[in-house]
Amino acid sequence: MTSNFQLSVDDQKLVVIIAGEPSGDLHASQVARRLKEKLPEIELVGMGGDLMGSAGVKLLFHIRDSAVMGISEVLNMIPTFLQKQRDLKKLIATKKPSVVVLVDFGDFNLGIAKFAHQLNIPTIYYIPPKAWAWRGNRVDKLAKTTSIIASIFPFETEFYRKKGANVEFVGHPLLDVAQTDFTQTEAQKSLDIADNYPVVGLMPGSRRKEIQCLLPIMLEVAQNLLQRIPSCQFILPLAPGIDRQSLPNMPFVEIIEDAVYSSMRAADLMLVASGTATLEAACIGTPMIIVYKVSLLTWWIIQHFVNLEFSGLPNIIAGREIVPELLQDEVTTNQVTATAIDLLENPEQCQKQRQELKQVSKSLGLIGARKRVADLILNYL
C-alpha cells in the first residue's frame, strides 16, 4: 500500500480507477491521460501499474504482484487480493467518489462493483469480464451492479444488452495503440534486422508462469526451424514488466525492448501465447500461431466452465479458425514446428491470414476508445 496517501480535491472531482493486470494498466492509463487533458483538476486514485501512475493516477496499490496465471497461483493470492479489495472498499466508502471505473480484472472488480452499487455510487465497467465465455450467472450480477458497461467488442455489446445491461460500444482500445506507420521492411531496418531473411517473433506471454511454460518450447521450435531454414531470424519483444535478466541465455534470439509493435510489424510469423498479444498482432496484421498451455487443474476447469469453441481472440471474433491454435497437449515442439514450417514455406497461407486479420481489425470499431470512455466518466462529474 502506498505510504503517505492523501487526496487534495473535493469528492465531486474524485474518480476511483481499478485495474489489476498489465493490459488493464495500459488501457486505464490512456483514459486517465484523456481525463487529465479535459479536466486538469480531476483527482484519480486507485490500483494500477507504472503506466497509470505516470498518467496521474495516485496508486493505493501497485499491480506488480497481481499478475497471476493458473488456479494454484490464484488460490495462493486470495488473502492478498481480499485485503486489497477491503482497503479499496474503505476508500470508496470514506471518500464517496463521483464514479468508480473498473477495468477488466473480473472477479476482483465484480466485488467492487457490488459494493459501490450498495452505496449508490455510479460504476463504469470498461473492458468487462468475458461473461459471454463463462457458463453461469456472472452477466446478471454485472448488469445489476454496473451503471454503464463500456464494451470493446460488437458481439459483446449485443450480448450484454439482451441481458438488460446498460451498454455503450466504445471500440477496442488496442486500435489506439497497436499501430505502426512502418512497412515491414522499414520496421526491420529500424530494429537492425536483415530484411531479406525470414523473421519469426516469439511472444511467450507477460506472466512469469506463462514464460516458464512456453518459452522453452518456443526456443526448441526456433532451433528446429534453424535446421530447416538456416537463414531464419528470431526476435523476442520484451513484455512490459519482464526483466531480461530473468530470461535464459538465447544466443540465436534478439531480445527487443520497448518496441513490441515494431517487432510485430517486422515479423513474418509470430508464435504468441493466447491473450491480448494475439489481438495486437491482428491489429498489426502479422500472421501468427496461437499457443496455450496451463496446469491440468486449470485446463479441467476451462473444459468444464468455459463456453467457447476457440481460445484466441482473433478466432473468437471471426467465429472460425483463421489462425492456427495449439492448445495444451498440442503444444509440443514437433507440432508447433510443423505448423510454423507450413506457414513459412507457403506464403499464400500467410497472405490469406493477413486478409482475415484485417477484417478482424475492422470489426473492432474506430480508434478513440479512450476518448469515448473518458466522456462517459466526465458525465458523472
Image (cartoon, rainbow, N blue to C red):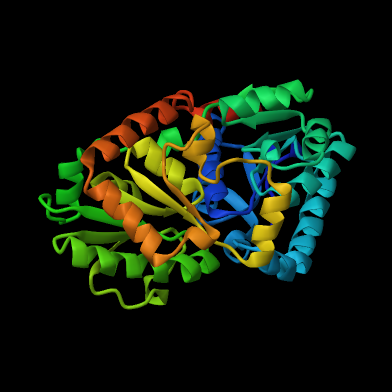
Give residue 307's quadrant in the image.
Answer: top right
Is residue 7 rendered to the left or right of residue 69?
Answer: right
Is residue 290 rendered to the left or right of residue 373?
Answer: left
Quarter containing the N terminus: bottom right
Figure check: 150 above or below 110: above
Q: How many marks?
A: 0
Figure check: 186 above or below 35: below
Residues 345 and 282: in front is 345
State the residue at coordinates (76%, 65%).
78
Q: Is residue 4 visible?
A: no
State the residue at coordinates (67%, 68%).
73
Where residue 253 sits: x, y (%)?
A: 26, 67
Q: Is residue 31 visible?
A: yes
State the residue at coordinates (27%, 69%).
223
Give residue 237's quadrant in the image.
Answer: bottom left
Where residue 311 sits: x, y (%)?
A: 55, 46
Is residue 129 rendered to the left or right of residue 228?
Answer: right
Where residue 70 sits: x, y (%)?
A: 64, 63
Figure check: 63 above or below 131: below
Where residue 176 sits: x, y (%)?
A: 42, 34
State the residue at coordinates (37%, 71%).
244
